[in-house]
């Protein structure tokens, strides 16, 4: 961002802060903070299916179903429809503070040979144009303005993995994957002179590498190691950042090289930092260390499929119980460096809807209450508040026809979204189990003196709860859900024990206590990676109104803004790598340390490292390590890999795409690690390469015997 934009932004920000905070005292969503979503609630909209606010932009011909009886076709929903539902109070009354909308870019117009269309927005044609059936750029601007005026953030979906359906052998299949840069054809799948696509066939999902370098179904897969594509996608997302978006949901992150995505994130964080989360699908019970690694190292968060599948197992299918759920809560808090940044949900457009025609709505209500009081950024899929049903795509994407604000689900959401705003324990707190059996789960979220306790009984019998201890101070507590789910009021005595009470069948109770800390407490830092000169935002409480200092590792950093709950810092030019962050108040109180902020060596580009003739024995793999922090600073434990050896290059060649500093002379070596971690170094002198200023590059060397 240039200085003038920064100045304009800070003037706008001060005016905004003045008007917001001079008239209200209650904490509320702050759309000027685009990096901390932990206290927000996201509402996921399939734009075409939410509300048709402008029938003049509806498609005509064979891709349109005017009564939406064919759910594979466009049904008319648009950005005007979302604006209308903000203006009429439906979305504001629900209390949600962010919208995740379908990818806004122009999509293919063709009817897919199987009768499908691009109504969902995942089949891009030109990222620098709008999907005309959702609206034009004016409509998009008005959507952003309307949302922001109502303290609602806007997140767009983004598909940098592929363009659209294509068949190498048949140019007339759909639109042949053709992709345009603001009207100029860049290439199509069967006519690809710039080499912007992979031509390696479809993936059988047999390995991580196979899923990355081959097509996902029939979708024309981008070659992200191509300067044109790299530049085009990075420029495209900047165009939407310039339009004022507040967040990005990245499609199919498991199907793209992590290195390229890391370089994308560093570009975004240097330009306009916004919360970004990727979609890495996991099935029920699936735990994938690569998924944790990606969430911890790529610079973006993930949709929390472990949470989503687990809550479905306990409350929808009944295939597991609260012990299993709590185990997921405990292990994920360790596996994810920032578990509060992972995006939680109970269903979405790629799985069966939580509500079922055959069963009562109560299980949806219970699940919503747990979702909204748990760690992570909760997302509600449009229509859940109206108990929409539908088993699989496209039945789980039916149009919303009811906008009833009196449903239990609507009311529960409204109560708990405002609790997330007023009590920071829900956004920043740890989770502690306080009472558990297979039916009952009582858990506490705590941040400083702020406490929220949730008690849920999924069973059909009532439980008398004795011996419950919490951090709630002595006193009486009313159910924050106003007995919408048959909750109880409780009394806490001086020794923090809760007087015994009955937890009714299928009941949820929420009790809370709010008290700000007088000493500094960091709840969130965003983003957790960046290069010197970037802005990073620290949220929490007790920072004081007078400016103190912030330490990054052992360095004191430059402060850009300071308030009791939010500090903006400028990243200094110190030694790259991981550093902890601490806040010190003007009267010399020190905060907790927020660990492992990653300071990059500099601007990032993607480099493909290739080593030939690296023979290994079964169970051994090749990794790369080098003299920059992005390559592990010569520490074999931090080496990057295991490298790939099947698709782009084949064994005994190994390759890997890695985000490394631009315009830098880098030294590196390859190592072999066996199954138990024994390391064998290459002999000879270090390899070296000078990385480009921009774009991508490849370096190929021989393994030194
Ligand atoms: C995952 C999306 O959520 C899904 O709906 C889409 O079809 C695929 N990625 C391909 O873009
Ligand atoms: C340790 C490795 O053994 C060696 O090969 C490499 O050159 C150095 N690290 C670089 O400092
Ligand atoms: Ca329309």
Image (tube, rainbow, N blue to C red):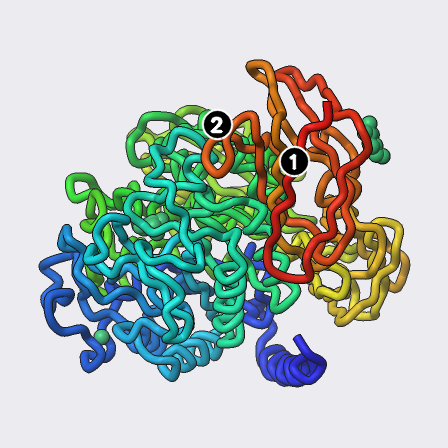
Q: Is residue 158 left or right of residue 471?
A: left
Numbered disc in front, either 1 or 2: 1
Q: Where is residue 109 shown, x and y percent of the image?
A: 23, 67
Q: State the residue at coordinates (59%, 72%).
A: 32
Q: State the residue at coordinates (49%, 35%).
A: 442
The number of numbered badges drawn on the structure is: 2
Q: Quadrant of the C terminus?
A: top right
Q: Where is residue 416 shown, x and y percent of the image?
A: 45, 55
Indicate the quadrant where residue 282 lies: top left
Q: Is residue 504 above or below residue 277?
A: above
Q: State the residue at coordinates (19%, 65%).
A: 74
Crowd class of label 1 (few under 14; some 14 to 19; many from 20; radius 10 Å): many
Q: Earlier in the sequence, mark 1 or mark 2?
A: 2
Which residue matches tag 1? 640
Q: State the residue at coordinates (43%, 56%).
A: 196
User: Which is nearer the eye, 514 or 334?
Assistant: 334
Q: Where is residue 600 shown, x and y percent of the image?
A: 73, 53
Q: Which mark is residue 436?
A: 2
Residue 475 seen from this side: no
């Amino acid at each position: 961002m240039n200085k003038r934009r920064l100045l304009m932004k800070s003037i706008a920000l001060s005016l905004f802060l003045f008007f917001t905070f001079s008239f209200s005292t209650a904490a509320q969503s702050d759309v000027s903070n685009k990096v901390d979503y932990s206290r927000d609630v996201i509402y996921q909209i399939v734009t075409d299916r939410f509300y048709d606010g402008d029938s003049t932009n509806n498609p005509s011909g064979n891709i349109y179903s005017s009564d939406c009886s064919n759910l594979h076709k466009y049904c008319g929903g648009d950005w005007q429809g979302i604006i209308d539902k903000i203006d009429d109070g439906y979305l504001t009354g629900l209390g949600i503070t962010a919208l995740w909308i379908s990818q806004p870019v122009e999509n293919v117009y063709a009817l897919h040979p199987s009768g499908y269309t691009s109504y969902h927005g995942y089949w891009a044609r030109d990222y620098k144009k709008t999907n005309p059936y959702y609206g034009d750029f004016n409509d998009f601007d008005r959507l952003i303005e309307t949302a922001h005026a109502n303290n609602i953030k806007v997140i767009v979906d983004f598909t940098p993995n592929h363009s659209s359906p294509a068949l190498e052998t048949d140019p007339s299949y759909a639109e042949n994957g053709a992709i345009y840069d603001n009207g100029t054809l860049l290439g199509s799948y069967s006519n690809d002179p710039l080499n912007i696509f992979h031509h390696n066939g479809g993936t059988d999902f047999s390995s991580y590498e196979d899923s990355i370098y081959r097509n996902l179904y029939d979708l024309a897969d981008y070659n992200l190691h191509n300067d044109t594509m790299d530049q085009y996608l990075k420029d495209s997302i900047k165009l939407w950042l310039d339009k004022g978006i507040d967040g990005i949901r990245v499609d199919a992150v498991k199907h793209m090289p992590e290195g390229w995505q890391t370089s994308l994130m560093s570009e975004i964080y240097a330009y306009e930092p916004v919360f970004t989360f990727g979609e890495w699908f996991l099935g029920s019970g699936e735990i994938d260390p690569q998924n944790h690694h990606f969430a911890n190292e790529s610079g973006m968060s993930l949709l929390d499929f472990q949470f989503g599948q687990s809550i479905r197992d306990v409350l929808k299918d009944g295939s597991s119980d609260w012990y299993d759920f709590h185990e997921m809560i405990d292990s994920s808090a360790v596996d994810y460096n920032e578990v509060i940044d992972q995006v939680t949900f109970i269903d979405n457009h790629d799985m069966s809807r939580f509500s079922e025609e055959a069963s009562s709505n109560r299980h949806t209500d219970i699940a919503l209450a747990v979702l909204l009081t748990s760690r992570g950024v909760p997302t509600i899929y449009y229509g859940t508040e109206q108990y929409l049903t539908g088993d699989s795509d496209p039945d789980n994407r039916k149009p919303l026809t009811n906008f009833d604000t009196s449903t239990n689900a609507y009311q529960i959401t409204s109560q708990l979204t405002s609790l997330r705003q007023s009590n920071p324990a829900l956004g920043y707190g740890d989770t502690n189990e306080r009472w558990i059996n297979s039916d009952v789960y009582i858990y506490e979220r705590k941040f400083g003196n702020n406490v929220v306790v949730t008690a849920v009984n999924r069973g059909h019998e009532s439980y008398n709860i004795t011996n419950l201890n919490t951090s709630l101070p002595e006193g009486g507590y009313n159910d924050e859900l106003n007995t919408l789910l048959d909750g109880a009021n409780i009394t806490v005595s001086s020794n923090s024990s809760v007087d015994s009470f009955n937890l009714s069948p299928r009941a949820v109770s929420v009790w809370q206590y709010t008290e700000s800390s007088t000493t500094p407490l960091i709840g969130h830092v965003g983003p957790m990676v960046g290069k010197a000169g970037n802005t990073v935002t620290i949220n929490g409480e007790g920072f004081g109104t007078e400016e103190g200092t912030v330490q990054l590792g052992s360095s004191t950093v430059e402060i850009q803004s300071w308030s009791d709950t939010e500090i903006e810092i400028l990243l200094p030019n110190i030694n790259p790598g991981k550093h902890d962050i601490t806040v010190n108040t003007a009267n010399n109180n020190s905060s907790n340390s927020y660990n492992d902020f990653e300071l990059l060596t500099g601007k990032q580009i993607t480099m493909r490292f290739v080593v030939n003739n690296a023979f290994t024995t079964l169970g051994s793999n090749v990794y790369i390590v080098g003299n920059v922090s992005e390559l592990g600073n010569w520490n074999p434990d931090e080496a990057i890999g295991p490298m790939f050896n099947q698709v782009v290059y084949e064994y005994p060649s190994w390759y890997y795409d890695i985000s490394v500093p631009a315009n830098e002379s880098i030294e590196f070596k390859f190592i072999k690690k066996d199954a138990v971690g024994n390391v064998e170094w290459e002999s000879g002198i270090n390899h070296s390469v000078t990385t480009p200023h921009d774009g991508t590059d490849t370096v190929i060397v021989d393994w030194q015997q």
